[in-house]
Image (cartoon, rainbow, N blue to C red):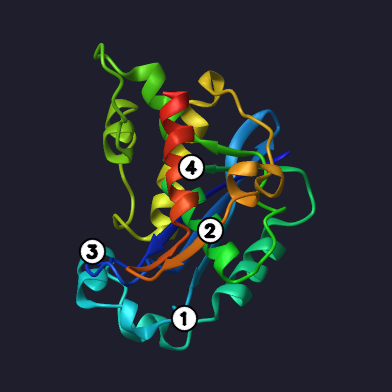
Amino acid sequence: MNYIVYDLEFTVIRKQEWLAEIIEIGAVKVKDTEGKLQIAETFQTFVKPLRDSSFTAHTTSFTGITLQDIQNAPSLSSAIEAFRQWIGDEPYYMCAWGPDDKYQLVKSCNEHKLPLDWIRNHNDIQKQFSRKHSTETTFRQIGLKRALEMLEIPFEGSHHRAVDDAVNTAKVFIAAFGDLTLAENNAAEESIYTTHTVYETGDNEPNLPLGNLAELLKRSLDDKK
């Protein structure tokens, strides 16, 4: 069994009519080697956004990714295919820090009419870690930086760069593995992603791509808290 710990970086949106787009995918493959979990491989690709206007100075300021980084990058469909090829055919769990990456990945695949069946056995490591280690009566999510500090693991690389965040998330995943319960699921079979209208227009409202999906995901997350 492989554990694919991944992170996405998106365009930073300041205008309502624009949608966030994936501009970087980073991942590590964690394997059990002689009874010990270790990072075995890494993956990174930039992604060229479909709408150039969605890439602004705000995105560079937040992520450090420049227009030059993405100008000759592959399209989302090509980047996803490379990611899937890298994941390989062995059984795997997908793990991310928080719910945003899965939401953005599913949203983007739906927008580009890409399959969802490979987004399987997806687990939110932040949620489980926070439930285990939160010291307050009211549940609060613990950030990745704070989780590393709690485990006395130094952060390596740059914040908000996909492969660096994936590596650091993998370190938390390995350290906390004994406390995690990994679920089996498949986005292609989950009604929250597949059975509702995800694009609406009206005479007096702007286009709201995947508005229902966002609302349904929020309800699902609220129900699980």
Q: Nearer the viewer, mark 1 or mark 3?
A: 1
**Residue 196 located left or right of residue 54:** right
- Cα distance between the residues tagged 4 and 3: 28 Å
- Cα distance between the residues tagged 2 and 1: 19 Å
Res 159 visible = yes
Q: Which residue is label 4 attached to? A: 216
Q: Quadrant of the N terminus?
A: top right
Is 98 or 178 nearer to us in this picture?
A: 98
Residue drawn where x is 33% and y is 50% of the image: 156
Q: Which residue is label 1 attached to? A: 50
- Cα distance between the residues tagged 3 and 2: 28 Å
**Element carrying mark 2:** loop
Q: Label 1 sits on what residue type?
A: Leu
Residue 164 placement: quadrant: bottom left
Whichever of callouts 2 and 1 sits on the residue coming sooner in the sequence is 1
Residue 132 placement: quadrant: top left
Whichever of callouts 1 and 3 sits on the residue coming sooner in the sequence is 1
Q: Residue furthest top?
A: 137
Whichever of callouts 4 and 3 sits on the residue coming sooner in the sequence is 3
Around disc 3, counting alpha carbons within 10 Å, would you say few (fewer than 14), some (14 to 19), or many (20 or more)?
some
Residue drawn where x is 54% and y is 23% of the image: 180
Residue 35 placement: quadrant: top right
Checking the image for residue 198, the label placed there is 2
- Cα distance between the residues tagged 4 and 2: 10 Å
* Residue 150 percent across, percent down from the top left: 29, 26
**Element carrying mark 4:** helix
Checking the image for residue 62, the label placed there is 3
Around disc 2, counting alpha carbons within 10 Å, would you say few (fewer than 14), some (14 to 19), or many (20 or more)?
some
